[in-house]
Image (cartoon, rainbow, N blue to C red):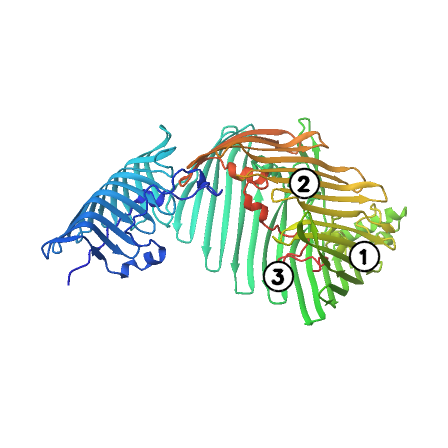
Amino acid sequence: MRRALRLLPLPLSIAICLPAMADDKPVNWGLCPATDVLPVFDDAPKADKAAAATRDQQDTDIEGDQLLGTTTVPQYQGNVALKRGDQFLGTDHLSFDTESGNYIAEGNVRYQDSSIRMVAKRAEGNQEADTHKISDIKYQLVSRRGNGDAESVDLQGAVGQMHRSTYTTCDPSQPVWKLSAPQIEVDNDEGFGTARNAVLRIGKVPVLWAPYFKFPIDDRRQTGLLYPQLGLSGRNGFDYAQPIYFNLAPNYDDTLTPRYMSKRGLMLTNEFRYLYDGGRGELETSYLPNDKLRDRDRGQFQFGGYHNLNSTWQARANLAWVSDERYTEDFSNRLLGVTASNLQSQIGLYGTGENWTGGVMADYWQLTDYTLTEAALPYARQPRAFFTWDKPVLPWLETGVYAEAVRFTHKDIHGKIVDADGEFVRDGTETEMFGGSRLDIKPYVSLPFSGAAWYVTPTLAYRYTGYQLDRGLADQIRLQNLDAAGIANPTPEQLRGNTSPSRSMPIASLDAGMFFDRETTIGGKSFLHTLEPRLFYLRAPYRDQSDLPIFDTRDFTFSWGQLFRDSRYTGADRQNDANQLTMALSTRFIDQTTGKERFSGSIGQILYFDDSRVTINNAQSPVEQGKSAWIADANYAINDRWNLGATYQWDPKYKREDLASVRARYLMSNDGIVNISYRHRLNPDGSNLLKQADLSFLYPLSPRWSLVGRYYYSIEDRKPLEIIGGVQWDSCCLAVRAIARRYVRNREGELNNSFQIEFVLKGLSSIGQDTDRTLRRAILGYYRDDLYLVPPSNTGADRDDYDPNLIP
């Protein structure tokens, strides 16, 4: 039986490996003038991946206008076509020696499969020795848009060589950039290729030369250099980072990044990642010996990972450490590095079931603000156990319990002063901090009744919170209470605090609402108009809690969600007394044609029937009988491009606005966007907490050119927080982004200047700093898809954490 002729193995390495996308932003191929560099061959079979998966099990069909020669050396003439699965080889003339295995294909040689399409003048080789030589090649990648040519390809089994080859994602008529190499060696068994004397040209200008360039040709990772990052800033000077990737094993790898900063020195950053069936993790470390600006060694450590013990339980850790209190400020490019005052490390065991969640964990806090002392740190929970259970017993009966047991510890406080140079330094004083243990249990019963247009949910809960305090903390609390009561010269017995204080109290609430809707027409368009009134009544008796410590409790920021909570405090150290009613009303206009919500608005207020006497501390004023501030929120989608929103809080008691926030967004064509916002919030004492204006935009000047920018300004401080200005140029296959940035770099309000430039070779990689990350953070909608992501709720309970105040 005559052996079937195998199709030519064409591992065009540069066409397979180099198109790895390095830029996250979706590539705009619409600027490319041509769709196919090589048109689809009419006589080729459909090139789909399903056929490619079974090609090895199929025979090769050979067709031609004429069959000449002998039985052992058949010769096919005219429209010769070889087909197997998704593979196709066409030529004008094919001769094949069935005994020796030699073949020659001449004239209009064409090859196509699901991944590549190519044409050549000649192909010859030997089937037995698995050697092939293909001459004068032009190729195009089917899915990745890469294309190029090669003078010849020599293949010997899994190993091959490409001579004088090129690769680009540009149209051949407009080669904005091109990568060329006189020789590329390929090893399919090992999964890598080696290019020698490779040259990258932008236009006709060579911008990068690599005497030896090793790269992967399939999904297997390879050890080697990644693309560098370049930058220039007033804080670090010239900034160059060169990542080096180490492929240690299929399930773990390592990236070592030497980073040179002309004003600081050489920093080494290392990232180790691992992955296995039951979990994964990532360890990042950095070390900068003798920072020239700080005159000391500096570094950081960060680990995040988890391990699944079974389908119910998971061990998880997030650990962080920095060498000094200025580290996050000096090495963060975001405003968060200036505002963050601490780092949290946490390790724990967490479980979840059908009706319950629980776990045991511990955490630790490190100070990262040199202007503060350890007094600003939260108490560490070492350890903490929590459990929640919630189960519908009947359609109208739901029961549950929230429980937590925790031991609180705190670092001692070291005092600080400002020295002659204006630096914050320790003054040698030390204040011992005491801790304690807390048990908090809150069972509840709820009766959810509802119909098609209404619901009524009464809930009754009972909360018990008990403590075991260190003697020093109990005595401190007693002394504070005596001072607040104006008792002078207390006796030793009066100074002795209660080490086992507790609080127990019932909490009752009633949540009720209705839904009204009607069809209406506005401006000739049909809308569904809803009206949704809601009442929430809360009743809790007063309990004296002055003997209880404050470990992890603070006031909730007054907001829409606060209208419907059963406590105005986060944490269990305080439970407010209440006799209050929330009245709220929401309305929406929904386009009947598209289903889009064109307008939504809500307004609400709390009526306090009695004074609420419980406070966080003795200096805080209680909530008096009367009315809370009005809370209003509205959002109006004028059309598919314009969107307006506003949030407003008005306090009728003091006749002032506690919060005003206005935002507007305009969507342009070609991914353009403009965001404008204004925020103003007061402190409880009436002073300004913040007053800020923010403008950001991506403005297309043409299909290729666009401007990007942000102006983030603090009206209260009369200074900018961040200014970004830049330009983008986008072509068929090359994008260039250049941005200048001026932003607050430390807590004294000093500004830093930086300049970033990035070349994005579409289908290849990017060279320069990650401007994409900077712009995505600064301009909401720089990635249009970001506008449609649903943000996580900041009022719901996290399944991995416990807060008994956040009842669903």
**Which quadrant would the C terminus be assigned to in this image?**
bottom right
What element does badge 2 sit on? strand
Task: Name the amino acid, label 3.
Answer: Gly
The residue at which mark 3 appears reads as 359
Task: Name the amino acid, label 1.
Answer: Asn
> Quarter of the image holding residue 455?
bottom right
The residue at which mark 1 appears reads as 498
> Quarter of the image holding residue 182?
top left
Residue 575 image point, x, y percent: 78, 56
Dot 1 or dot 3: first in sequence order is 3
Do the residues bearing badges 2 and 1 touch, measured as CB atoms within 8 Å? no
- Could one spot residue 565 in this view of the protein? no
Q: Which sits in the foreground, 208 or 525?
A: 525
Residue 799 image point, x, y percent: 62, 59
Query: In the displayed structure, would residue 62 be above or below residue 489?
Result: below
**Which quadrant would the N terminus be assigned to in this image?**
bottom left
Distance from label 2 to label 3 (Cα)? 41 Å
What element does badge 1 sit on? loop
* Viewer-side label of 2, 3: 2
Distance from label 1 to label 3 (Cα)? 30 Å
Dot 2 or dot 1: first in sequence order is 1
What element does badge 3 sit on? strand
Residue 295 image point, x, y percent: 56, 31
Q: Which sits in the foreground, 171 or 254?
A: 171
Number of other residues with Cα within 10 Å of mark 2, as a class: few under 14, some 14 to 19, many 20 or more? some
The residue at which mark 2 appears reads as 663
Q: Which sits in the foreground, 39 or 485?
A: 39
Number of other residues with Cα within 10 Å of mark 3, as a class: few under 14, some 14 to 19, many 20 or more? many
Distance from label 2 to label 1 (Cα)? 51 Å
